[in-house]
Amino acid sequence: MRFLSLLLVLFSFSQFAQAQRFAYVDTDYVLANLPEYASARKQLDELSVKWQEEIEAKLAEVDKMYRDYQVEKILLSEEMRIQRENEIIQKEKEVKELQKKRFGKDGDLFTKQEELIRPIQDKVYSAIKEISDNKGYAMVFDKAGTTTVIYSNDRYDISDDVIREMGYEPGTLSDEEEELPEEDSDE
């Protein structure tokens, strides 16, 4: 009897798995074959080099200020030494701020990358979605880098069911009001 139950479960699972259609895409390959992506990458690389040279020039200025200060330090009064040290420290801060502005988390390079690359990625995603819908794929995996789900048909998404199972209502949690589900207490 156990063998028959196991066979029935395996048969059911294999039928379910056959009903699902999966595909994969190598987005690195796709992007590498798009002229607009190559053009955007070139623009980003040129900007990056330009901004890096700008930062290096400013760092060279700071270095020169420091070397000059070291040479002249014994000739300067205490007040003048403090003033020059503060100037050097201020210049270093400016360079670090510029570096952060250009290459930081939400810096100019990131913003420019979003501006140039995001529309291309959106086009790729739209093409993947269109092909997936036309060919009936339930999920599409991205072969580039780590394998991730790049497209999935919403009818196979059980996220809301999981949220309900955990005692929450999907879509009701706001940023201002994070409530936990009420727990039964025996007080």
Image: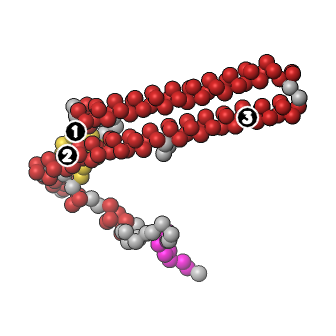
Q: List the residue tagged with mark 1.
A: 25
Q: Which mark is residue 101?
A: none
Relative image position of residue 31 (x, y in whole percent): 26, 35
Q: Residue at x 40, y 67 (%)?
A: 166
Residue type at mark 2: give it: Ile
Of residues 116 and 79, the one nearer the viewer is 79
Question: What secondary structure is found at the residue carrying circle 2?
Answer: helix
Whole-Å distance between the Cαs marked 2 and 3? 55 Å
Q: Main secondary structure of the magenta part?
A: loop
Between disc 1 and disc 2, the foreground one is 2
Q: List the residue tagged with mark 3.
A: 87
User: Which comes sooner in the sequence, label 1 or label 2?
Assistant: 1
Relative image position of residue 22 (x, y in whole percent): 18, 45
Q: List the residue tagged with mark 2.
A: 128
Q: Residue at x 73, y 20 (%)?
A: 67
Residue type at mark 1: give it: Val
Say few, some or many: other residues with alpha carbon within 10 Å of mark 2 (under 14 / 14 to 19 / 20 or more).
some
Q: Is residue 97 above or below residue 49?
A: below
Marks 2 & 3, CB-CB < 8 Å contact:
no
Residue type at mark 3: give it: Glu
Between disc 3 and disc 1, the foreground one is 3
Q: Residue at x 55, y 36 (%)?
A: 99
Of residues 98 and 165, the one nearer the viewer is 98
Q: Quadrant of the C terminus?
A: bottom right
Q: Quadrant of the N terminus?
A: bottom left
Between disc 2 and disc 3, the foreground one is 3
